[in-house]
Image (cartoon, grey):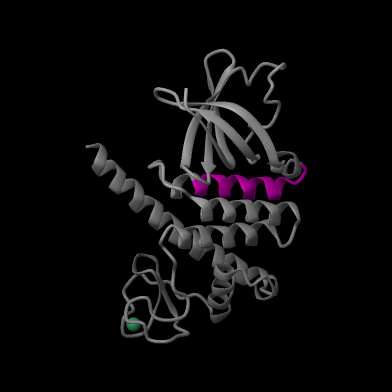
Amino acid sequence: MTLYRDAGVVLRTHKLGEADRIVTLLTRERGLVRAVAKGVRKTSSRFGGRLEPFMHVDLQLAEGRSLDIITQVETLNPFARDLGSSYPAYTAGTAMLETAERLVSEDGEPAIQQVQLLVGALKALVGARSTPGLILDSYQLRALAVAGFAPSFDACARCGTEGPHRSFHAPSGGMLCPDCRVPGSASPSPATVTLLAALLVGDWEVANAADDRTRREASGIIAAYLSWHLERGLRSLSHVDR
Ligand SMILES: [Zn+2]
């Protein structure tokens, strides 16, 4: 039996048989991992509540024939406990876990930056460093950037001409200059473009100063950009399956 250690965040769990669970984790060394936690649903389980979604844990696993088996768990940050008391923080955190699961692949490659980013965002939620909505928006932009889809909020995403520009087009990768503008581009306000750029680099002084209307518009742009990339990802996956 080959044992190995890893650290990461529990993204999701589902029931397996009478007492077990399959736990989906975002880990530093192996990216997205699905592993079995035996006996975890018994009240006497030695894992306690350490394998709930949001928990940041250090693990020992045994390689299995199909799924690996979790043999030891130590808590690094008890985010599940800390997020339970604030509904807005909990829902923003849930969206982060879903985003992480969709953006990181199951190819066994390390995901150190994605783990750091998610742990940092969950710490920011617990510490109420900004509103849950802004922390989520910033996390999603930065997770996209780490996955290789950094949007451009200054230079034109097509020709590189220095901004600021007025048109945003998700399939093109960000803001477009008047020459490159394509039909279907959005026209966010200059304040929204400033907020988006601040969220991408984690400039909280600028981000926290934005008004509600600007925040709403930025959230809409980020949601459009994220869903465009995720839908494209799913489409390419369905090609592989067939
Ligand atoms: Zn251009």
Q: Is residue 86 magenta?
A: yes
| Most frequent secondary structure within the magenta stretch | helix
Q: Nearer the viewer, residue 165 or 43?
A: 43
Residue drawn 37% across and 83% down? Answer: 177
Q: Residue furthest front?
A: 2
Q: Is residue 224 visible?
A: no
Q: Residue 240 location, x and y as percent? A: 25, 41
Q: Residue at x 45, y 85 (%)?
A: 163
Percent across and percent down for residue 122 are 66, 51
**Residue at image location 43% in from the left, 54% down from the top:** 227
Farthest left residue?
242
- Residue at the image point whose x is 70% and y is 43% from the top: 79
Q: For this rendering, which residue is in front, 103 or 74?
A: 74
Q: Which residues are magenta?
A: 85-100
Location of ligand 1 given as a quarter of the image? bottom left
Compare residues 199 and 113 and report the one nearer the observer.
Answer: 113
Query: What is the x, y in percent for residue 70?
Result: 56, 27
Query: In the rendered picture of this protein, how many numbered marks are placed on residues?
Result: 0
Tell me which corner region of the image, top left, top right, bottom left or bottom right, holds residue 19.
top right
Residue 225, given in percent of the width and then of the height, sits at 44, 61
- Residue 11 vs 16, above or below: the answer is below
Q: Is 8 colored magenta in this rendering?
A: no
| Horizontal arrangement in the rendering, residue 89 relative to residue 102 (left or right) | right
